[in-house]
Image (cartoon, helix red, strand yellow):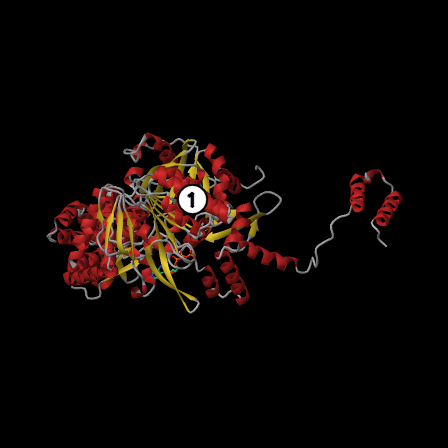
Amino acid sequence: MTTYTPMIQQYLQVKAEHEDAFLFFRLGDFYELFFNDAIEASNILEITLTSRDGGSTDKIPMCGVPFHSAEGYIETLVRKGHKVAICEQTEDPREAKGIVKREVVKVVTPGTITEGKSLDANSNHFIGAADQLDEKLYALAYVDLATGEGKAEIITGDERTLIGEIEALGMKEIVVRERLHITLNEWMAKRDIVLSMENGEEDNNSLNVQSNIPNELHEACDILVSYLKRTQKSSLEHLRPFEYIQKSSKLSIDANSMRNLELVQSIRNGSKEGTLFWLLDETSTAMGARKLRIWIHQPLADRAAIEDRLTIVSDLLEDYFLRDDLKTSLKEVYDLERLSGRISMGSASGRDLAQLRNSLRRVPHLKNALQQSGHERLQRFSEQIDPCSEVLDLLEASIAENPPLSVKEGGIIKDGYHEKLDQYRDASRNGKEWLAGLEREERERTGIKNLKIGYNRIFGYFIEITKSNIHLADLSRYERKQTLANAERYITSELKEKEDLILNAEAEGQELEYTLFCTVRDEMKNHIRRVQRLASVLSELDVLLSFAEVSEKQRFVRPQFHDGRALEIKNGRHPVVEKMMDHSLYVPNSCKLTEDANMQLITGPNMSGKSTFMRQVALTVIMAQIGCYVPCDSALLPVTDQIFTRIGAADDLASGQSTFMMEMMESKYAIANATGNSLLLFDEIGRGTSTYDGMSLAQAMMEFIHDEIGANTLFSTHYHELTKLDLELERLVNVHVAAMEQEGRVVFLHKVMAGPADKSYGIHVAQLAGLPDTIVVRAKELLDAFESGEQAAVATAASEQMTFFDLQEEPDPVSESDKAVLDQMKQTDLLNLTPMQAMNLILDWQKQLGSK
Ligand SMILES: Nc1ncnc2c1ncn2[C@@H]1O[C@H](COP(=O)(O)OP(=O)(O)OP(=O)(O)O)[C@@H](O)[C@H]1O
């Protein structure tokens, strides 16, 4: 190391502490990267790789990005799963003795990046921390650094369950202690989730973010907060106390079911189009959109809380004008949560504060409108709204109407807020006018018409009087500064005072303005919690307005809840499928699960709508439990505690499991965790293995669910044999999705009807799919044979075909002499024969067999 220049040595010291990050090393107007960092980053960022002398014999690889456009480069690296440590000069180079001090001021990581073009403000970006509590028990804490929102929950299950939850929440980075690092490393690598290690023990009590959560979760929260402190190195005042996600108060939907039901991400391409979120998102603010996502992820399981949301939606639905008015106002409310985050982390600009002010201006109106709505529940909602008047007053007084983005070039603070700043501005804006005024004044006072005020760099501003006019001036007021051939130059104390102001006005004004701005911004920190609470209430209002809006457009109705287990949906629809097709083409279907008959076995042709029917029931339950109206004529629902699904082909490619294995694992998970209050949806269980295997598994599962769990269950199958199970399982009923055959083709009616389906129509669907006629015809032949109980005939027909070219006639029975040859052959010890002996033996056998 000693052979390197002092600067490179400094670089290497800093880099040693940030081995896992690209080090952006500030040199003047650039961030430079060296050594391997430079080689790799130049590749990823497609920038030129150069080199420089660093004291050693070899040149050092180097690349760099201008600091003013670094954000985009940092974002690119982070998006690709890397970390970037930003190392700044922390002292003024003019005052530095030797090499300028440099320090890492922030480490940007995939989980902590808060700004950037690729970040979607409409969804949370959580970074999580996990801690293992027991063999099958984990603690998971997560925070959205941009908004300060934090949650913590206990995960019951193995690593797969933990990872499922991490994936469902879309986390890009997980922080753990060393022991869990070893366990999770490979899992995370397969899923492109960055696994970071935190072994520090910071004192996190000061942030007071763990007040309301059980002790088992503290360690996970600690790991996370320590990591955030270590990487962010800025105030984290905006971190809100962790919210404990208590399983019993939420409808739990495991990660597979979230995916299968396409709640926030479509299976096909991961986009939001075609998802429940897409359907329900008519929010006006980014905070609202984020809240909606979280609500969908964690619906309620508390009847009173659900009814409360539904009541607000009803009230809003009744009053179109109120809704319109509230929506218009909400559209002008900016992202208060992210603004609070920026204020806390010291990155808020004047424009951010203006946005906060503009948002707060709308709040009294929102509050009043709700208050005057005449609806008791909305009035109570209004009471929860804190207009944060002190914050608004301060911002109104201090922040200019349209401040610029830059915080150091002035124009942020309002005129009249600070006397000294006003003077600076006055001086700089009106400096010339003031001088002209002074010149006029002095001319009038002295009567010297050619008296003038001038400026030079040595003496500054001066009053110049030609020698011939000096006798007219009252020299006691002036101090002579310079004598020229035909004139004298003077200054006055007033002029000097003004000169200071004028000359320094702009520079000092900007500096003072920056200080004032920082003071206002710091003062805002004291109100962050209030602003966050306001944000939370407004985002809730935004989501409920969105529910009302969508419910009206899509003709949804208010669900009724009861304390029993029965689930009765009359003329239900799949809201997303319906929205994507012509409304009038969607065939509504009812679902009736009663205490005495809470399992349905659904049969019907492929493509008839079995899984659509099952999904629509699940979506109705979820929509109802997030407090939204539901797509049907009426719904009587129990409060469901968990939903488990085994639907479709959402295979977990990353885990490397086969489809069938996945199916079995999902089924196992459901069976192990479901209760009598759960909803189970099993779509064609067992189809991934042989018929008898699959059918037996499906039957055994149904029996188990029926006898041991008792959950409301929809089970679809192609195994017609299973439809006889209703004779054994008393709470099982058969339904089928109807189809008709017309002129040899199948017509799907998409109508769910009582009783089992009589045909499977699989061959018709194959025909629809365009399979060659030869195959379709042959399949029909075989099917007819199977159905008429002629399996033997089918088998024979098949074997006839297979043996057509091989055997022409029955072989002769074996004679006694031939048998003797065969016996000799069997008993011959080939290993102890010479080739010659073997040849002779074969010749002998041929003779005995009568061969020629
Ligand atoms: N109630 C309905 N009204 C109108 N169209 C429907 C209805 N239900 C389903 N469909 C249409 O039928 C298509 C097939 O439905 P779905 O995938 O549910 O069939 P399936 O019986 O589960 O098929 P498979 O057994 O092959 O999985 C859907 O994509 C949808 O377009």
The front one of 316 and 827 is 827
Quarter-of-image position of residue 797: bottom right
Q: Which residue matches tag 1?
A: 699
Q: Is residue 201 above or below residue 676?
A: above
Q: Is residue 482 left or right of residue 168?
A: left
Please give the name of the residue rendered at 43% of the width and 53% of the height, measured from the top-left corner: 718
Type of amino acid at the residue the image marks with label 1: Gln
Q: Report if residue 169 is visible in the image.
A: no
Question: Is label 1 within 8 A of ligand 1 (CB to nearest ligand atom)?
Answer: no
Nearest to the observer: residue 413 or residue 269:
269
Front residue of 370 and 20: 370
Q: Is residue 668 visible?
A: yes
Quadrant in the rendering for residue 101: top left
Percent coordinates x, y for residue 737 in the rendering: 36, 57
Split into 4 quadrants, where in the image is the N terminus? Answer: top right
**Quadrant of the image for the C terminus?**
bottom right
Please report the residue visible at 53 percent of the width from the left and 42 percent of the height from the top. 8
Q: Where in the figure is residue 301, as x and y percent of width and height? A: 27, 42
In the displayed structure, does residue 205 sit left or right of residue 87? left
Is residue 337 shown left or right of residue 163?
A: left
Quadrant in which ligand 1 is drawn: bottom left
Q: Secondary structure at mark 1?
A: helix
Task: Say whether residue 667 is left or right of residue 356.
Answer: right
Q: Residues within 10 Å of mark 1 (few under 14, many from 20)?
A: some
Snapshot quadrant of residue 749: bottom left
The image position of residue 433, as x and y in percent, is: 21, 61
